[in-house]
Amino acid sequence: MENMIFYGKRVCFLGAHPDDIEIGSGALIAQIAGKTDIRCVTFSDNQKNPELKNLVQEHYASMETLGISRDQVILMDFETRRFQHLRQEILEEMVSIQRSFQPDIVFVHSIADIHQDHKTVTEEALRAFRGTTVLGFDVIRSSYGFFPSFLIAVTEEEADRKVLALQQYKTYAKKYYFDPAITRATLIRNGAICERQYAEGYDILRIVATFGQEDN
C-alpha cells in the first residue's frame, strides 16, 4: 500500500493551551521536526492559575522532546476560558502569523471540539488562513463525534516520542488523557482505520491542492 505524499515548506500548529498541540499532533511533529520549518503557537500560558505555575517550562520540555526548539514555539497569554470575548485580538495575532510565516499547512483543533477556547481558535484560524490547507486534530478530552478523515501514518518510534513528550507535563500526570496507554490506544486505533500500525488522525477543514502527474 502506498501513502499519499504531502509536504509543506512551512507548517504551523495552533493550540489554545499548553499540551493541546502535543496531544493532537505529537507523533506527527516528531516525524517532521527537522524536515520542514515549523511554528507551534499556543494562545494561553495558563499562568493566571497558581496550580499551573510549572506549565510553561513543561511545555518547552515537551516540545524539545519532539525536536522543537524554543525559537519555534510561540506562547501567548490570552486568558483561559475567555477566548470568545477576545476573538478579535486572537484573529489579529493569527493574521500576523499568516503574513510573517506564511504557512503552507495549518493544524488546529477539530471542528468537533466543544471546549470554548478550542472552538474560538479553530473558527478564527479558518478566517485568518483562508487560502491555506487546514486540518483539525483531536484533543480527546473535549472532542465529541470526532472521526478522522485524514490519517497520517507514524512509526513506533514517533509514537514513543509522543508518549515521552506528554510525560514532561508533571502537572497533569494524574489526568486520564495523559495515560500512555490512552495515547498509544488512540494511535493504534487511528492506524487500524487506515491499515497501518500507528497513525495521527485529523478532520479536514480545508484542503487547497494542485493535481500533478509524473513526467513519463
Image (spheres, helix red, strand yellow):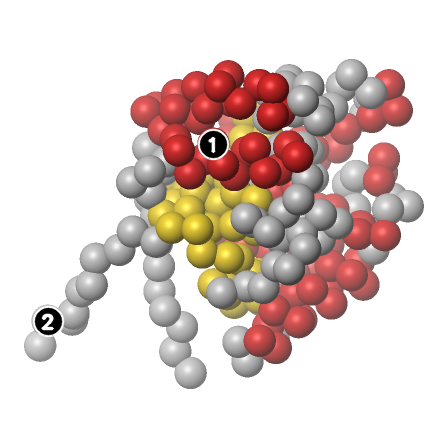
What residue is disc 1 on? Answer: 124
Q: Residue furthest right?
A: 174
Question: Marks 1 and 2: CB-CB under 8 Å?
Answer: no
Question: The disc labelled 2 sits on which kind of residue?
Answer: Asp
* Count of numbered circles in the view: 2
**For numbered disc 2, what is the local secondary structure?**
loop
Q: Earlier in the sequence, mark 1 or mark 2?
A: 1
Residue at (69% x, 59% y) in the render:
160
Residue 147 placement, left or right of 47: left
Residue at (79% x, 46% y) in the render:
167
Q: Is residue 67 above or below residue 214?
A: above
| Between marks 1 and 2 in the image, the one whose residue lies nearer the viewer | 1
Residue 185, x across and y down, in percent: 73, 67
Q: Quadrant of residue 130?
A: top left
Q: Residues within 10 Å of mark 2 (few under 14, many from 20)?
A: few
Question: The disc labelled 1 sits on which kind of residue?
Answer: Glu
User: Which of the labelled discs sits on residue 215, or is there none?
Assistant: 2
Residue 25 placement, left or right of 172: left
Residue 100, x across and y down, in percent: 34, 24
User: Which of the labelled discs sits on residue 71, or is there none?
Assistant: none
**For numbered disc 1, what is the local secondary structure?**
helix
Q: Quadrant of residue 92?
A: top left
